[in-house]
Image (tube, grey):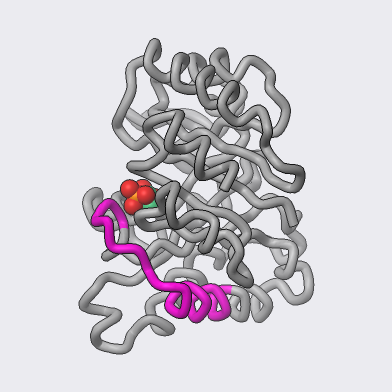
Amino acid sequence: MIKLFAANWKMHKTQAEAKQTAEDLVRLSAALPPGREVLVIPPFTALSATMAGIGGAGRFHTGAQNFYPATHGAFTGEISPAMLLDTGATFALTGHSERRHVLGELDAFVGQKTAFGLAAGLKVILCVGEKIEERKAGQLAEVLTRQIRLGLADVPKDVVPEDISLAYEPVWAIGTGLVAGPAEILEAHVLVRKLLEEIFGAPARRMRILYGGSVKPDNAAEIIALDNVDGVLVGGASLKADDFSRIVLA
Ligand code: PEP
């Protein structure tokens, strides 16, 4: 399985900053080991500049943080999958914790977006993860089961497995500096794999499961080596090309 190193820039960077960071990242990651690929997910406004910065470098991709599940129409402020593909973006996130918990997206809507994005030709990374109070209440399995079953409810069973990835991102570890320990990551990723196998059967073994939550240059190697960890989704530590290149080379 090719490991995916994804940089979620959230609401950061102008076009010029994005282009420069992407150029620096490609240069600093020239020794990218085989079996790895890199995905940069800037704000919509910097997608084209990020593409320009990548400059056609192999194994570097761009993706979007969000989209609306419709082809076009009266959806003020929204962006369609076709518009993203038009910029050269090939991936998109759905269900990121900030969209769920800050912007109020519900499981059913996340599911609608996931299926729509895949049907429109995007590779989709469905993000799931429990809040600290859910973990403390022993609800990890319940939360992941609900988010994954509803998030994938409308995805055809014969979806190309490489087109869909899951990102396990415990909400308590995002942007907090608190990273889940190896045992916690292993437990959650086994659960995610089992759920994917229940839904899609054997092809689920070809679906990537990423870990996200305070991944940094000094913990990336340990995390990426764990069973069922097929990549990482990185927020804060992806903003500087130097830090993120140390993660992709870890
Ligand atoms: C994220 O935004 O998906 C994320 C994991 O952020 P951070 O790496 O900053 O915790």
Stretch of the chain drawn in magenta = 174-192
**Residue 130 point in image, percent of width and height:** 33, 71
In the orientation shown, which residue stands out farthest toward the bottom? Answer: 138
Q: Image point 37% across, 44% down: which residue?
A: 235
Q: Is residue 15 above or below residue 107?
A: above
Q: Is residue 211 left or right of residue 139?
A: right
Quadrant position of residue 67: top left
The one nearer the camera, 112 or 19, is: 19
Q: Is residue 123 above or below residue 73?
A: below
The one nearer the camera, 96 or 61, is: 61
The one nearer the camera, 94 or 207, is: 207
For the N terminus, the quadrant is bottom right
Q: Is residue 182 magenta?
A: yes
Q: Would residue 138 be visible to someone looking at this image?
A: yes
Q: Is residue 153 above or below residue 84?
A: below
What count of labels does the image hold?
0
**Residue 214 point in image, percent of width and height:** 35, 54
Quadrant position of residue 225: bottom right
**Residue 200 point in image, percent of width and height:** 70, 72
Q: Is residue 145 magenta?
A: no
Q: Is residue 172 left or right of residue 235?
A: left
**Residue 163 point in image, percent of width and height:** 68, 50
Q: Image point 51% across, 20% down: which residue?
A: 24
Q: Would residue 96 be visible to someone looking at this image?
A: no
In the orientation shown, which residue stands out farthest toward the front? Answer: 218
Q: Image point 56% across, 13% down: which residue?
A: 52
Q: Is residue 129 above or below residue 197?
A: above
Q: Image point 49% across, 32% down: which residue?
A: 80
